[in-house]
Amino acid sequence: MAEGGGEEAEAEAEAEERLRAEAGLELRAPVREEQFAAVIAHLRHNFFADEPLNRAVALCAPGQPHAELEAHALATLRDGLSCVALHGATGQVAGVALNGVTRPGDVARARAALDALADTKFRRIFSLLYGANLQLDLFGAHGVDRVFECRILSVDRRWRGKGLACALLRRSEAIARQHGFKVLKEDATGLFSQRVAERCGLRAVAQVRYVDAAARDEASGHAPILPPRPHDCLKVMVKILH
């Protein structure tokens, strides 16, 4: 349970109890190394194909591996701040929140490293994400030298619509508080993840409309990224943890 944030802690406990009672799901943190393979398998069948930007460029088919996305996920898992929802009866992964630490200069270095990657679709997606973040200085604005970032929030299709995404994000906030973070951030790329973030108290500090980004891409001779409706913008969303 988180220290501080009493209302948030109470909401987290109530949500997790409801998931146990109604769906047989248990949230656990941190994700252990022996669970990494199951988490990656879950992502291949869900997030990798379903995330709006991935879907817009047809990054990969459901169940298909993706080297760069898997490297990104594994690096985040190794930060030891992620949480997983498991179905108690089967042990299957029902959902995950992959959380990592971002420090000053990390985004600029990651953006520069994209140039060495062969996968142009991956580069286009992360260029958009990193570009939005490079317009911000969360470190200077809030007097911190690290930010807790929810990088991937994913729920298996079979357990969607039960409040699991919100429960995972609330548990992530509890982890952030336990580790003394003052800023929680998520790049919410679709309408549904934005609604979840808003329910958990995050607010948009930057926004990129996909039609505007597409117009800039076309003007510079690049293929545009236009996710399907109802996803119309990327929002960088933040919650300050007192």
Image: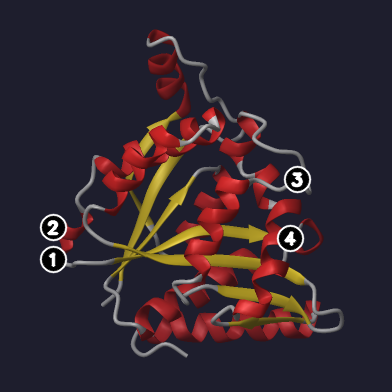
Looking at the image, which is closer to me, 210 or 9? Answer: 210
Helix, strand or loop at label 2? It is: helix
Amino acid type, callout 2 = Gly
Amino acid type, callout 1 = Gly
Q: CA distance from mark 4 to mark 2?
A: 38 Å
- Is 99 on the left-hand or right-hand side of 163? left
Residue 228 in sight from this viewpoint: no
**Which marked residue is nearer to the observer: mark 4 or mark 2?**
4
Amino acid type, callout 4 = Ala
Residue carrying label 1 = 143
Residue carrying label 2 = 140
Residue carrying label 4 = 41
**Which marked residue is nearer to the observer: mark 4 or mark 1?**
4
Residue drawn 54% across the image and 55% down it: 71
Quarter location, residue 217: top left
Q: Residues within 10 Å of mark 2 (few under 14, many from 20)?
A: few
**Place of residue 93 in the rendered image (x, y in percent of width and height, measured from the top left):** 74, 70
Residue carrying label 3 = 64
**Which marked residue is nearer to the observer: mark 2 or mark 3?**
3
Q: Residues within 10 Å of mark 3 (few under 14, many from 20)?
A: some
Q: Residues within 10 Å of mark 4 (few under 14, many from 20)?
A: some
Q: Earlier in the sequence, mark 2 or mark 3?
A: 3
